[in-house]
Amino acid sequence: MKKLVVLLFLSGFQLLFSQKQVTGSVSDEFGEPLVGVNVIEKNTKNGVVSDFNGKFKITANLGTTLVFSYIGFNTLEKKVEGYTLDVILIEGQELDEIQVVGSRSPKRTVTESPVAIDVIDVKDISTQSGKIEINQLLQYVAPSFNANKQSGSDGADHVDPASLRGLGPDQTLVLINGKRRHQSSLINLFGTRGRGNTGTDLNAIPSSSIKRIEILRDGASAQYGSDAIAGVINIVLNDNDEGISGNITYGGYNTNADGDFLPGTPNTKGNRLDQNGNGTSVGKNQNFDGGSLKIATNYGVKLGKEGFANFTLEYLDKNKTLRPGYDFRRGFGEAEINGFNFFGNVKTKIADKTDFYIFGGRNYRNTDAYAFTRNDGERVVESIYPGGYTPRITSVIFDTSIAAGIRTKTDNGWNIDISNTFGKNLFHYTIKGTLNASLEAASPTEFDAGGHSLSQNTLNFDFSKSYETILKGFNLALGAEFRTEQFSIFAGEEGSYATYDVNGQVVTDPANQTIPTDPISGNPRPGGSQGFPGYSLENELTKNRSNLSLYADTELDISESFLLSTALRFENYSDFGSALNWKLATRVKLSRKINLRGSVSTGFRAPSLAQIYYNLRFTNFNSGGATEVLLSPNNSPVTRAFGIQKLNQEKAANASLGFTASFGDFTTTIDGYLIAVNDRIILTGYFDATALNIGVSEAQFFANGVDTKTAGLDLVFSWKRNIGNAMYSATLVGNINDMKIDNVKNGSLDEATFFGKREKAFLLASAPANKFGLNIAYNRNKFDVGLALTRFSKVVLVDYSEQDDVYDAKTVTDLTVGYQFTKSLKLTLGSNNLLNVYPDKQDEIGDTEAGGYWDSVQMGFSGAYYYARIGFNF
């Protein structure tokens, strides 16, 4: 190992002194200098941008290749054959460089698009940030993207819900390389953002496998189908065909939580939870926790002259964070994650104008999070856990996907893309440090609790053709899609869900069987695994449906300055019917550098199979105690008995108006939007169910419960300039958002129970009033610095005592410093939330949803994170 290190050091030293400074200029066809052109040594991080006069200076070896790229121009590659290099870029871009989500035209750039699109270079943001998951990366660079870490929310502790423009996680469609990505089988319950929604697990996709992320911030159901009410996230995979790159990152969190805590508060100095104990015992003090190790590598190789194969491996090991909570919530904090990811992206030419492509991967995660603490009463068996215990909800999550297809171009100009995409998410629970109280001293302390899965198969036929002779250009796209979905719930072992009598037999005849009681309170002991009851045989189900859709999409350049875009899409679902949606968008060039754009559209989202059929009996904890609850499926007689009707599609109307400008070093986009969604599917509050004699105290349901209206403004201002040998850049992103609940559709049911003050607050907290981020970067030779300031707005939630939990606006500071030792090795040191800022500490009652001193809010609740990263490129 020491020899290898010495060899790498000497190789880097040799490279360092063999490099020379290459100077040159970049201009367009008319000889005008181009400002801000990216000049990058191919397959490296070594790069600069051209200055105000189109000049550039870069350190590079003779024989290497420089890549020149600029929005609106063809990308150019030139070999370094001397120390002076002048190039001319030709206007109009190659297909692979400019095809962005939201437009099927092969010549549309982001600033000329009729709708708002962010294109995020993941390599740049991932190497300049300590965020190790996609959700957290996007949280700090995309204006209206929000994601939350959860605690005490069962499965949502393991999969972060994320959203655009304050809408639900299931109202944003995710694509990979333009193909529909399957959703998670998890449905968010309790006090999560996206309560009652399913969503796509972005963290199942390794960041090292991603070239860029395109975010369409506009309603797109008429273009892409269900789930695209808020917009579309398209993940474009790496297509690098040469070399190995990657990084090793290690970091940890500062445990010094901000706030004054009473002596003996769990997870403060002298009273930290011993994670090796029974969940209530005290461990040693720690200055840092949540230690995170991430190892990622990406390998690319050429396949023939134009093909490539690109593969990514990623390993993540992240420990729990534990923050101050209450005696009934000693395990408040972020979950532990141990995961392994593989992704591949392959394309090869099989004929002159025909390519075959295949991409996909497999994500494995083993996660571990604490549930609420059982201190005494009928849920505690003293002979197993003297003084109580804190159960752990662990899960094994498998996410598998594969897409394959053929793209060809006919002699008469039609582009044809035929593909099939399959994806599956499997979520399997194991509850540890637990017991089945009805078995008393004979109870195991670990149970297989079953789980759920969702699979999706999508067959696509896409056709498009450009007609350059119709006015100034006309693009026509037609297509069909056939999709099948399957949702399943599978049972755990008997002890995870059953209640036993005093003889150790499963209770099937409550009138004639005696249930064990707590010797102190005299209350009957509950059955099932504590922390999370397993899915029973009664919960088991497998449900399927299919969907057929047809679409037409056009873009017409009526003149050099006036673009008109239209889309129409018909969808038919096998289980609830049809939908027809349309979209009209336009862009007007007010000048060569200024554009005005806008769109109007209709949208829809079909209820997910999970929302229709999910069912579970669980224990709901709050400071007042615990109650048994039935989450009744939508097709159940219990649901109908309360007057809840069959779920229908959510219906939306979107409108947007925007402005874009590009002046040399400076680019800006400002986009306003208005989104009305009727019949939004919500998870109701808890209704009294004791009269039904079904073994629970309360019941809740999924229902088309509310109409909402969301108005907002997205802002992106970016500036980049070379001054001497240094590159400076600054980007300001912002979102201003206002959601109103126009109507609660409770029918004859009590509104306060159906969707009361607490439930309304959870929905509105998913649409925070504003978020602003300022990102500043400086790069000179081998040294770079990045500073990011992110301000999260005020959020108000409602606790179990019906009191407001107010979280005032806070600003989080991130800092990163990097040094490129050689062409192949770089060291980065940094901190997320450098100043250890926390949300406002709540009162001493302990009525927050998660049982800690903070709820789940956008800025998180784990404090400062410090990290070091070694990046390599060979």
Image: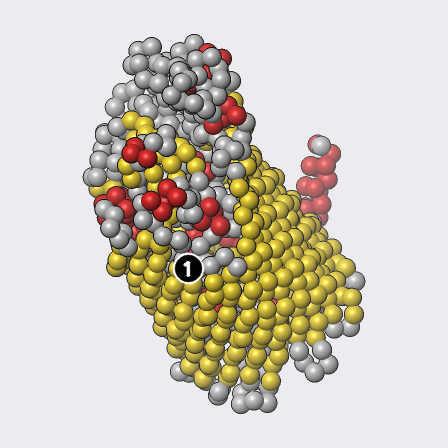
Residue under pointer 1:
649
**Is 474 situated left or right of 245 in this image?**
left
Number of marks present in the image shown:
1
Q: Residue at x 63, y 68 (%)?
A: 461
Q: Residue at x 53, y 75 (%)?
A: 553
Q: Nearer the viewer, residue 95 or 280?
A: 280
Q: Position of residue 412 (x, y in %)?
A: 70, 83
Per the image, label 1 sits on a secondary structure element best described as: loop
Specify the farthest residue to the left.
803
Q: Amino acid at mark 1?
A: Gln
Does 460 appear above or below 245?
below
Instruction: State whether residue 252 appears in this view.
Output: no
Q: Position of residue 66 (x, y in %)?
A: 65, 64
Specify the farthest residue to the front.
512
**Is 247 situated left or right of 258 in this image?**
right
Q: Residue at x 70, y 65 (%)?
A: 406
Q: Nearer the viewer, residue 616 or 814?
A: 616
